[in-house]
Image (cartoon, rainbow, N blue to C red):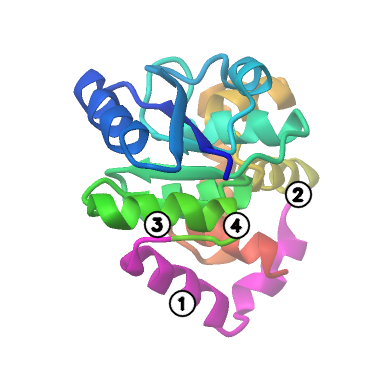
Amino acid sequence: MPLLRVLLFDDSDSLRMALSLLIGGTPGFEVVGDFPHAQNAVEYIRALAPDVVLMDIDMPGITGVEAVGQIRKAGLSVPVLILTVFDDDERVFTALRTGASGYLLKHTPPAQLLDAIRDVHEGGAPMTPAIARRVIQWLSQPPTLAANNLATLTERERQVLELLANGLSHRDIGERCGIGVETVRTHLKRIYEKLHVHSATEAVARFYRR
């Protein structure tokens, strides 16, 4: 039976070493590389051909979510499993919408982490239970007036919201639209007011449920 090839991205040297020892020391697994940043994630994936990518979010250079976006834009279908300490709605929702295949918190027990790597390789979408409950709540919410208020957005506001929903950072949105980061924030503030929401996560949820 071929080994399941795993590629790691995490800026913590100690955690990368621990993950490498855990995964690489488990029968049926092989760690093909581990890196402290994801700036060259696409190149590494093409060169090392992993079966699963394990991705942190908060790293120098670009975030794990931005790296997922680059991986998907490059046409790479390798499953990317987020492993992070962050459990706030905005990061969770944006990571999944950008193309992450699963979302685990770093307190996940080793045996469950290994099971999740197998699961995502076989087409599953493993998530820490608390994260899975939030996703279910998002999907089960009934349509609200805010969903209809998208029609009140200006063309620029709709463009900013769509780019946000595609996982772009405020800086990248500004570059794409030819405006400054503060102007992006101003547009987002107006979007929140028009949609009667209080965060980027809620705004993006309205966009996808329009």
Q: Is residue 41 visible?
A: yes
> Left of 62 or right of it: where is 208?
right
Tags 1 and 2 touching, CB below 8 Å:
no
Secondary structure of residue under mark 4:
loop
| Residue with the mark numbered 3 | 115
Q: Which percent across, then down, holds residue 45?
A: 62, 23
On screen, residue 32 above or below 56: above
Q: Quadrant of the C terminus?
A: bottom right
Which amino acid lies under the numbered mark 4 shown in the image of this protein? Answer: Glu
| Residue with the mark numbered 4 | 122
Q: Which mark is residue 147?
A: none
Helix, strand or loop for the magenta stretch, by majority: helix
Location of residue 75 by image quarter:
top right
Q: Which mark is residue 137?
A: 1
Which amino acid lies under the numbered mark 2 shown in the image of this protein? Answer: Thr
Q: Residues within 10 Å of mark 3 (few under 14, many from 20)?
A: few
Compute the Cα span from label 4 to label 2: 43 Å
Q: Residue at x 31, y 34 (%)?
A: 25
Secondary structure of residue under mark 3:
helix
- Which residues, given as a range, are shown in magenta? 127-154
Q: Nearer the viewer, mark 3 or mark 1?
A: 3
Q: Is residue 199 visible?
A: no
Secondary structure of residue under mark 1:
helix
| Residue with the mark numbered 2 | 154
Which amino acid lies under the numbered mark 3 shown in the image of this protein? Answer: Asp
Which comes before the other along the chain, label 3 or label 2? 3
Secondary structure of residue under mark 2:
loop
Q: Which percent across, then down, holds residue 204?
A: 59, 56
Compute the Cα span from label 4 to label 3: 11 Å
